[in-house]
Amino acid sequence: MAKFLSRSLVEDDDAHMKVALGYGDMGISAHLQASKTGNTRFFTSNTHSSVVLQGFDQLRIEGLLCDVTLVAGDGDEAFPVHRAMMASSSDYFKAMFTGGMKEQDLMCIKLHGVNRIGLKKIIDFIYTAKLSLNMENLQDTLEAASFLQILPVLDFCKVFLISGVSLDNCVEVGRIANTYNLTEVDKICQQFHPEELPLTAELGTGEFVKSTISSYHGWLLNGWLLYCPATA
């Protein structure tokens, strides 16, 4: 009796077999497995998921088969979307559309926790897997991603902040990190010592810069203190 072989005959790291069975130009990969009934070859399309995503995005653009409309809390602009797409990308929307909430049966839903810019960024990402970030749209995007539980977007925002933090902007980046509980970003910001920072404002009363103190609470706990030298 032939012995069943449970392991793959095509190892993932075998470059020669990948060339032989990869069909790279066709967007196909193959996996060969042997058993007592003979060889079975399993095929995987490397392009199918992206084609499906592009197809849903085109349906959204054309307004086809959309079954719910989302409206941001700060305006009236309508965003027609597909419940299945939103629920598959976000635990927030999954709970909303499948958990017996009143929104489950509504055709138009007002999302008071996000603004128009943030909501558009999130929807565009869900349908394209792409996200463009700059300091002007970052906080709107962060707020929406945090509220709607879009974890990949939160990760993109963290990477954006960490890659761009500098002596000139670490106070602002630290404030954003504290607001949205981005601990990895906050740790990077705390590597900049307060005595190296430029003055953020001219103070004539000797009052502390509240936003700076809040952003660098960890420094204050370690004995660091920002003050205006003119009033010392």
Image (cartoon, rainbow, N blue to C red):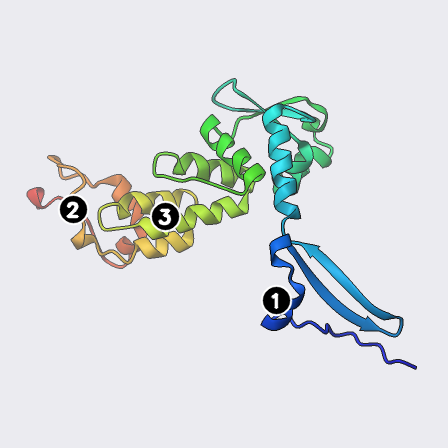
Residue occupied by mark 2 = 198
Mark sitting earlier along the chain (3/1): 1
Q: Look at discs 3 and 1 and give the one toward the viewer.
A: 1
As helix, strand or loop, the secondary structure at mark 3 comes to: helix
Residue occupied by mark 1 = 19
Relative height, residue 36 to residue 72 (above, below):
below
Q: CA distance from mark 1 to mark 2?
A: 57 Å
**Which residue does the image show at 59% across and 71% down from the upper left?**
15
Mark sitting earlier along the chain (2/3): 3
- x and y, in percent, of residue 140 in the image: 43, 34
Relative height, residue 121 to residue 42 (above, below):
above
**Which residue does the image show at 33% across and 56% down from the upper left?**
188
What's the amino acid at mark 3? Leu
As helix, strand or loop, the secondary structure at mark 2 comes to: loop
Q: Look at discs 2 and 3 and give the one toward the viewer.
A: 3
Residue 219 placement, left or right of 55: left
**Which residue does the image show at 70% across and 56% down from the upper left?**
44
> In the depicted view, which residue is nearer to us: 117 or 193?
117
As helix, strand or loop, the secondary structure at mark 1 comes to: helix
Q: Which mark is residue 161?
A: 3
What's the amino acid at mark 1? Val
